[in-house]
Image (tube, helix red, strand yellow):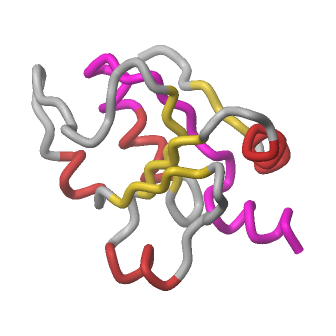
């Protein structure tokens, strides 16, 4: 498996403050997502629980996401996001993982 691209909270914030819309895929359970997720006018945030992604098979696609779009995958600490990103990468999506997940993001934003 090739190494997945990672993005630090600092790099993500810089990207959000840039011109381009940032597509974020949060793979936590819906209730956790509803409790807290990264929000910004430049952010398109999607919540697709990891259980859905773990069940994807070769040739499957996520209707909400174009393979042309760069996608930042996040979860609480980065572990589930890394597993999900590996699956999505294998399906041809352009993925990056938020290093340290939302825990690192919240720490960085303090």
For the image, the number of numbered tags is 0
Q: In this view, does 69 lie above or below 29?
A: above
How far from the left and from the top, in percent, is residue 56?
Answer: 14, 38
Which residue is depicted at the point 32% across and 36% down? 65
Quadrant (top left/top right/bottom left/bottom right) for the N terminus: top left
Q: Quadrant of residue 8?
A: top right
Please tell me whether residue 97 belongs to the stretch shown in magenta.
Answer: yes
How far from the left and from the top, in percent, is residue 98?
Answer: 63, 46
Q: Is residue 18 above or below residue 74?
A: above
Which residue is depicted at the point 85% across and 46% down? 10
Q: Would residue 5 appear left or right of 74 to someone viewing this image?
A: right
Q: Quadrant of residue 28?
A: bottom left
Q: Would residue 57 appear left or right of 9 to someone viewing this image?
A: left
Q: Would residue 95 appear left or right of 10 to someone viewing this image?
A: left
Q: Would residue 69 appear left or right of 5 to someone viewing this image?
A: left
Q: Which of 88 and 70 is in front in this view?
A: 70
Please tell me whether residue 90 belongs to the stretch shown in magenta.
Answer: yes
Which residue is depicted at the point 36% across and 83% down? 31
Q: In which quarter of the image is residue 103?
A: bottom right
Q: In this view, does 67 lie above or below 35?
A: above
Quadrant (top left/top right/bottom left/bottom right) for the C terminus: bottom right
How far from the left and from the top, in percent, is residue 96?
Answer: 56, 32
Magenta residues span: 86-110
Q: Is residue 74 above or below residue 92?
A: below
């Amino acid at each position: 498996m090739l190494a997945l691209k990672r993005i630090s909270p600092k790099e993500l914030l810089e990207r959000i403050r840039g011109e381009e819309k940032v597509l974020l895929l949060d793979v936590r359970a819906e209730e956790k997502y509803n409790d807290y997720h990264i929000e910004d006018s430049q952010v398109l945030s999607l919540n697709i629980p990891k259980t859905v992604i773990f069940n994807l098979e070769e040739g499957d696609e996520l209707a909400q996401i174009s393979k042309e779009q760069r996608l930042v995958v996040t979860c609480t600490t980065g572990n589930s996001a890394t597993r999900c990103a590996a699956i999505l990468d294998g399906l041809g999506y352009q993925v990056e993982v938020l290093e340290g997940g939302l825990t690192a993001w919240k720490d960085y934003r303090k």
